[in-house]
Amino acid sequence: MRLISSLLRLSVPLAFWLGVWGGSAHAGVVQVAVAANFAAPFQKIAAGFEADTGHQAQAIIGSTGKFHTQIRAGAPFDVLLAADDETPRQLESEGLAVKGQRFTYAKGKLVLWSAQAGLVDPQGEVLHKGAFKRLALAHPKLAPYGAAAVQALQCLGVYERLSERLVMGDNIAQAWQFVSTGNAELGLLALSQVAVPDRPRTGSWWMVPARCYTPILQDAALLTRGEHHAPARALLNYLKGDKARAVIQSYGYDL
């Protein structure tokens, strides 16, 4: 009886260690193509994802348009976190993304920002007054935020007048760099680049009215390479959870 009792006491820690070893053995790596505007929040989400599941999410940051081209060429991505809803839809129609897995993980917002305090007024009139030399934005053919920026300028009636002052980056991160380094006084950027949690907001900024651009619905897609990759599906499920959603909202996105 003493021997049986001892074995029963040992079975609990043994089962525990078997579970730990088994979990580690099944941990994997997900290759994720992440739209540049979502780089900072995804870094936090990936850290939580690894802590909670043991899986690692390795991010490749870039523009949605370039990712589309790379995926068509066979780039080894498991998941795409796009800056629009059109690219994931097209990838589904092309047989490069798994149908029925696409969902909107965030709704983006456009902001006019300057690193200079006081340059951007509360109504965004600086765009009409023209007291600047350069306005940065992402390339509209590569980045959905760039397309939204062009729509906003057209909506405000200043696109033609300011067209020669536009400086375009390959993605929204490069556009932000132009402004943060002083190479452009103004930038039409993602709110998530300005509203960083636990960091004081610097410079001056104005929220572009939502009526001035098509809603920026950012969709996630399970690519065909990741269809049978359990960590890829786990990441998509994690993005729908409360922890990830809290991070997303903290960067100024709507859900």
Image (cartoon, grey):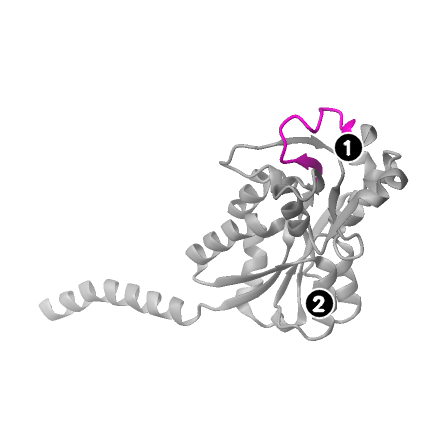
- The question of residue 122 being in magenta is answered with yes
Magenta span: 109-126
Confirm whether residue 214 shows in the render.
no
Res. 34 image quadrant? bottom right
In-image side of 126 versus 62 (left or right): right
- The residue under label 1 is 209
In-image side of 77 versus 165 (left or right): left
The kind of residue on which mark 2 rests is Ala
* Closer-to-camera residue (206/28): 206
The kind of residue on which mark 1 rests is Pro
Quadrant placement of the N terminus: bottom left
* Closer-to-camera residue (134/59): 134
Q: Earlier in the sequence, mark 1 or mark 2?
A: 2
Q: Which mark is residue 97?
A: 2
Position in image of residue 160 (x %, y %): 90, 41
* Closer-to-camera residue (155/21): 155
Mark 1 to mark 2 CA distance (whole Å): 33 Å
- The question of residue 119 being in magenta is answered with yes
Q: Which mark is residue 46?
A: none
* Closer-to-camera residue (78/174): 174
Measuring 25% from the left and 62% from the top, which residue is drawn there?
Answer: 12
Measuring 75% from the left and 41% from the top, which residue is drawn there?
Answer: 134
In-image side of 159 versus 28 (left or right): right
Disc 2, SS: loop
Res. 122 image quadrant? top right
Give the crowd class for mark 1: few <14, some 14-19, many >=20 residues within 10 Å. Answer: few
